[in-house]
Amino acid sequence: MMSALKLHNAMWPGLVGKGDEEGQEPPISLERMLELTAAAEVDGQKFDGIDYFLFLPHTDPDASDDELKAIADQIAGHGFKVGSLVAPVWPGTVGDSAMGDDEQTGKFLSAVEKACRIAKIFNEHGVRDGGVIRIDSAEFGVEKWREDTATNTARIADTFKKAAQIAADNGERLAAEGEICWAGMHSWRDMLDLLEAVGMPESLGFQADLAHTYLYLMGYNAPEHALVQEGYSQEEFDAAYTTMTDALRPWTIDFHVAQNDGGVHGAGSHDKTGKHCPADDPNGKLDITACSQYWLKDAESRGIRHICWDGCMFPNEMLESPETWNTILDTMIKVRDAHSAATA
């Protein structure tokens, strides 16, 4: 019998969209995000681990081995495992556009190399024994991509192939997160085309996020690929969701539980992306437990051992509230138990 999926919380909601620019809230430290996660409890169940963004102020991607081991000790001290890691592939971090020139794609590949190094240190420490390394095209917006879609998709695919080989050489797998803001990955059809163009399913797969893939259904940034229209019926939704998940599920090697209210949201440089909502948001469009099962069918056969909550763009007041995390944990437990029941 398969063991139950482990429940992880993402650390990056303390970073993404945060900063010191006008209108931004300050980042929340790794220590505080770990404390908030560790404090959550529902009927004796707690989070099993965390997924982790490899950039400042949580982590210097060029930190020494000893500094990284100290971080691993800090995480393990809360009883957590580390699962999937987010490579710092974006301009302004280590990387740059996977669709760019040789200098830009070189930076992108350097970010993957640094992520693999950190993964190895965490693995050897023992705090990490599973999960993937997450990437995307790091080309914000789709206007430039649309100037020559075939050439630009081929360029991203070439960069991804090189990145996937780096990961494979290090015993890791990459997962490309489909999100409407990333060129060449901004619709379910374009995402599938890119995965097929890379053609390395053992080393590069898909990371499905419930909030982002909901916007795939609606055709944001790619109306020609919309599967439902506003005012859809439940039957239309079920048929559309089946079409999308049947296409992308075979590639899916990492999974984010989330909620979406149908809008787009962003802050700072991370703008116009799927709006993550609280798990119990009354405007939420998704039956989280039901929709998760579409993605988690046969999950273990694709190497998925944990699921992660993604609460990007939550305001700090919400992130600091214990009630937020208990509600999220309760939602995660329902997703896990439904999957366990389906595979029993």
Image (tube, rainbow, N blue to C red):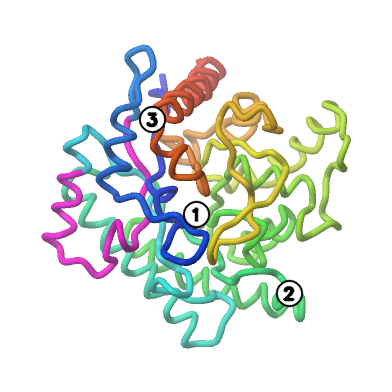
Name the mark nearer the viewer: 2 or 3: 2
State the residue position of label 1: 175
State the residue position of label 2: 143
Check disc 3 and report its element: helix, strand or loop: strand
As drawn, the label of residue 107 is: none
State the residue position of label 3: 6
Q: How far apart, in angstroms, are the residues tagged by discs 1 and 2?
A: 24 Å
Residue 172 spot, x, y in % from top left? 37, 56
Q: Are marks 2 and 3 in contact (CB under 8 Å)?
A: no
What residue sits 42% from the left and 24% below the top? 326
For the image, the number of numbered tags is 3
Disc nearer the start of the sequence (2/3): 3
Name the amino acid, label 1: Ala
Q: Quadrant of residue 290?
A: top right
Name the amino acid, label 2: Glu
Residue 215 spot, x, y in % from top left? 71, 47
Q: Which residues are magenta?
A: 48-74
- On screen, residue 45 versus residue 336, left or right, reads left
Check disc 2 and report its element: helix, strand or loop: helix
Disc nearer the start of the sequence (3/1): 3
Compared with 6, 330 (above or below) is: above
Q: Quadrant of residue 194?
A: bottom right
What residue sits 76% from the left and 60% below the top? 221
- On screen, residue 136 versus residue 272, left or right, reads left
- On screen, residue 82 versus residue 238, left or right, reads left
**Which part of the image, by quadrant, shows the N terminus?**
top left
Residue 65, magenta (yes or no):
yes
Q: How far apart, in angstroms, are the residues tagged by discs 3 and 1?
A: 18 Å
What residue sits 25% from the left and 45% below the top? 31
Residue 128 spot, x, y in % from top left? 26, 44
Residue 298, magenta (yes or no):
no
